[in-house]
Amino acid sequence: MVKEGVIALRGVSKIYGVGEIEIKALDDIDLSICAGEYVSIMGPSGSGKTTLLDVITTMMKPTKGDVFIEGVNTTKMSNAELAAFRGKKIGFIFQTFNLLPKLTALENVMTPLWINNVPREEREGIAKKLLKEVGLENRMNNRPNQLSGGQKQRVAIARALAMDPKIIVADEPTGNLDSKSGKHVMDILHNLHKIHKVTVIIVTHDESIGKLANRRVLIRDGKIVNSKSDNKLVCQI
Amino acid sequence: MKFDGDVVEVSFRNLKKEGLRTFLTLIGVVIGIASIVSLLSIGNGLTLAVEEQFESLGTNTIFVIPGGGMSIASIKLNQIDLDTIDNTSGVERSIPIYSKSGILEYNQEKVNVSINAVDPKKAEDIFQSTGFMEVTEGRMMEKNDSQGILIGTTLSTDFFKRDLSLKKQVLINGLSFNVVGILKPQGTSFGGAPNMGGSIYMSLEALKRLYSESNLSPSIIFVKTYTADDAKYSADSIKDYFNDKYGEDSVRVSSSEDLLNQIKTILDLLTLFITGVGAISLLVGGIGIMNSMVTSVMERTREIGLMKALGASDDKIKSIFLLESALIGGIGGIIGIIIGYLMSFTIAFIGQSLGYALEASMGIEITIGALIFSMIIGSLSGVVPAINAANLDPVVALRYE
């Protein structure tokens, strides 16, 4: 059986600036990512990989083209619809962790749960279970400044999983970590992909991280430069 | 925007996190609300006290004041004028009050006093029935009593080294008098406050010993009519008589209702004015909230970006910030109301102990009005920062340094 990818970009361009000085960050991109895939997006800085990620995560609307997630064209959605959609479908992991400094690890993991109106009584249970899964059951009541970089990123992973999303997007997840913590974080992501069958998309310029993925998408000057065959438009189930 | 318990919780938590800033912002609102509440409360209390005094005098009273208060030339009313008032239809009787000044000497100490005199024959029962003047010690003035004087407690205890007590002899303008009664402390009234420092009271007979009859003319005349309706018509007749005789507005004639309304208008204006000054300080408090919220939005830009990434809608972000500023307004309002009332009761207490008729009045309208006003100021101050927060581009906000 052949099916459209869980994420499908069709003729997507993103142009910054108006008038004569226009910068084409993304240039007519077609890309499909299948359910359960583990994809890395790689390229030099300024190549457009962050913009590509922003478009995939619906944080940014493309200037041209359509972005389908699970078959839904997100470019046609209002901001409010997009926010709700994003909250349920996509889990974010950032290079700089973006934990709320005054909240405990547990409260940080619970943040997406209240934002997306998960019933009060369920929140703590979900958050505790996830922190346990990333090995932080003893750090639940610590604030971010009481955690190491690797622990912070594990809290962020737990937070990304809170809404049980189908897609996890990680932007340079090991960029601020030493190699040992980085490896630990990558192991967790790898397991997520393997055990939970979550689609994982990692943006990185680190070759050693990038090659852990099943598929690499190389981007340069706003264009995907892989061979066409690598960049399949349909997914097999 | 529907009620969202989480938004309330998060807003509260955010305010708590910024403890010092929240506290300082609150102070601005508290000062504004406290000054409005205390000023309104004192203003209302003053109006109530005045109304109460007028009521105790009765609505069937007309006040005749020569010179009308504002005019330059003082007009001396004579016996013919007094008889005319007495003979006006509807008038039951008139009570002229004479005010002079003199030097009171006691125990070789001298003080200036204002002397108020009235004919006890005409006034005795009025004092009793209205409670306008009451003695705590001794007796009221009596008919043909040319020796006795009444004094207030302040004059009795505060003016001389040795207390000027009952039955003591004093000299007024060199003539000898006896203290026959000490007056109860009471609020400000017409013809001087009974308990104001340098006032003494005596019968007309006694005053005639100090001043020759030709030098005496009443400074105010209380005219009692049979009914409250009579007061209006009789006041008009008396006014016409004086206008014809001495010229327009040479003598002010007001029914107690007129006078009450005039005083109330002045008090209302005064209250409005001082409350307006208080409102300006609340406005400054509102700007304080706005300033604090703008700073907060800037500081929390990344947090806002994160919340948007995690699925928060623009409305949710907006409601968090709006609620934070409304909470500052509301909490500041509650604290301000409490402090305002405490202040007004303290002011009233100090005023009363100094002999002024200051009262603080606690009203449900003031309380609820102040609370709503503070919440409106709080919410309005938060509108612009909240919209700014909601309109942040999530991508830009998330990477904001």
Image (cartoon, rainbow, N blue to C red):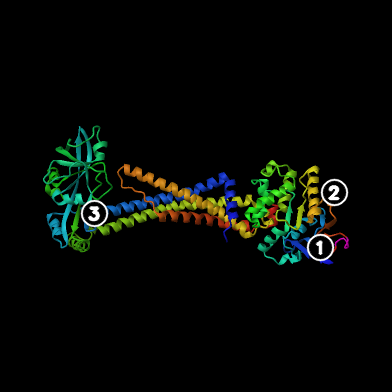
> A11 left or right of B267?
right
Q: Which residue is mark 1?
A: A32
**Amino acid type at image mark 2:** Ser
What x and y, as percent, mark residue B377? 50, 55
Task: Report the disc number at residue B57.
Answer: 3
Q: Position of residue B204 (x, y in %)?
A: 14, 47
Above or below, comparing residue A57 to residue A179 in the picture: below
Q: Give me the C-alpha separation between circle 2 and circle 1.
A: 23 Å
Do the dots labelled 3 and 2 sit on one chain? no
Are the two marked residues, 1 and 3, in contact with CB atoms closer than 8 angstroms?
no
Secondary structure type for disc 2: helix
Quadrant the N terminus of chain B occupies: bottom right
Question: Secondary structure beneath disc 3?
Answer: helix
Mark 3 residue type: Leu
**Spot occupied by residue A216 in the image (x, y as percentages of width and height):** 85, 56
Question: Which residue is label 2 attached to?
Answer: A208
Magenta residues, as a range?
A227-231
User: Is the residue B165 above or below the residue A87 in the image?
Assistant: above
Q: Chain of mark 1?
A: A
Q: Is residue B371 visible?
A: yes
Number of on-image labels: 3
